[in-house]
Amino acid sequence: MRNIYFLLPGTGKRYACGGLFAELKTMRLVQQFCPAAVVTYEQREPDTLFLDDVLQRPNLKDDIFAVSWGFHVPKLVRRLQHQHVVYHAHSSGYGFNLPADVPILTVSRNSLGYWGQRCPNGLLFYLPNYISEDFVNLHQSRDIDVLVQVRKSSEYLLKTLVPALQSQCRVVCLDSFVDNLAALFNRSKIYLYDSAEYWALSGVSEGFGLPPMEAMACGCQVFSSVNGALADYLDPGFNCQKIGVYSTAYDIERILAALSNSNPKRMTPEELQPYRMEHLLPRLAIIVEELNYFFDHRAKHASNIPGLAKPRLARLYWQKLTAKVRQKLGQG
């Protein structure tokens, strides 16, 4: 098994986000099958490998470089074009393409479908993000009615819905990093999440949507947008409710009703199982084995399956159009 280096710009507060934490969790899972480590490439950090130094080592054929940081991916892939590279895809819609010799590991079926169309000759895998056992329903009393994280929240949520709710129930808005988010979810009855506006402004998609699932794992009722990869697991009307529907009054009515509901809509433990360690490890073992087999093959064989480049698509379009015209002329 080859070593796997997880490339990150850095791991400090400047880079703190769901993507960073998900990448670190994935690395720890991978370490159960082969050597794996973080390699930073924007800033040097104590006790952490730096990409410039790693690339000076001999025998890099025994290593795999996993890239994941959205807008940095094309530049990193070019820099590592002679190495074994894997793209760990979180969000989709960045607009770049990848060569067929770069396998793609997606965290959602939404991203899997995106790359299945965008890179039809690439090796694709699906490995959902890991929801750690820290996120579990403690079945304790909940003193927060409604919890909101400011980051990624829509203008409607923060400036219209939250003020309207504050006069009727206890609303807590998080605008800074929290060390123990699971504890806060276990204190909350309802979690509001509305990221469609944020991702529309960013020009890319919701890659997984960790907070709603983590909240649901802790027993929160969730009102959420259902954009991008959130549709992988959110089932409005069954395990959650859709937010931002029709009118503010309609949202408020449903939220207040949910607060008094003795049988709330929640994600079941069975629905959460695919995201727990015991289900992810067997899948990951197969993926790691397949990656090593693929790179062994790539070392001996060139890629020879035509892709969907624009010139080829244009040629195929005109071939199809010409065939239709000939068929009609023949029928006439």
Image (tube, rainbow, N blue to C red):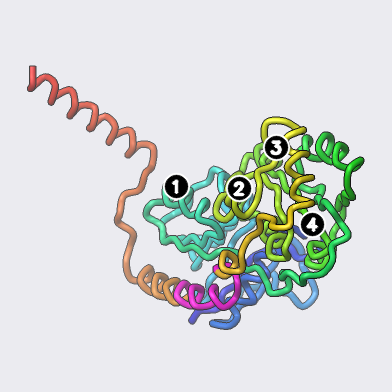
| The stretch drawn in magenta includes residue 286 | yes
The answer to whether any part of residue 256 appears in the image is yes
Range of magenta residues: 274-287
In three-dimensional space, the C-alpha distance between marks 2 and 3, rounded to whole angstroms, equals: 14 Å
Instruction: Identify which residue is drawn at 56% across, 44% down.
Output: 93
In three-dimensional space, the C-alpha distance between marks 1 and 3, rounded to whole angstroms, equals: 31 Å
Residue linked to disc 4: 189
Residue linked to disc 3: 244
Determine the secondary structure under disc 2: loop
Pick whichever of labels 2 and 3 is earlier in the sequence: 2
Pick whichever of labels 1 and 4 is earlier in the sequence: 1
**In the image, residue 64 above or below residue 236:** below
Pick whichever of labels 2 and 4 is earlier in the sequence: 4
In three-dimensional space, the C-alpha distance between marks 1 and 2, rounded to whole angstroms, equals: 32 Å
Name the one closer to the observer, 71 or 113.
Answer: 113
**In the image, residue 256 above or below residue 296:** above
Residue linked to disc 1: 118
**In the image, residue 298 above or below residue 157:** below
The answer to whether any part of residue 91 appears in the image is no
Name the image quarter holding residue 51: bottom right
Q: Assess disc 3: are there few (<14), some (14-19) or many (≥20) residues with their C-alpha within 10 Å of its C-alpha.
A: some
How many discs appear?
Answer: 4
Q: Nearer the viewer, mark 1 or mark 4?
A: 4
Instruction: Identify which residue is drawn at 32% across, 67% down.
Output: 301
Residue linked to disc 2: 237
Q: Nearer the viewer, mark 2 or mark 3?
A: 2
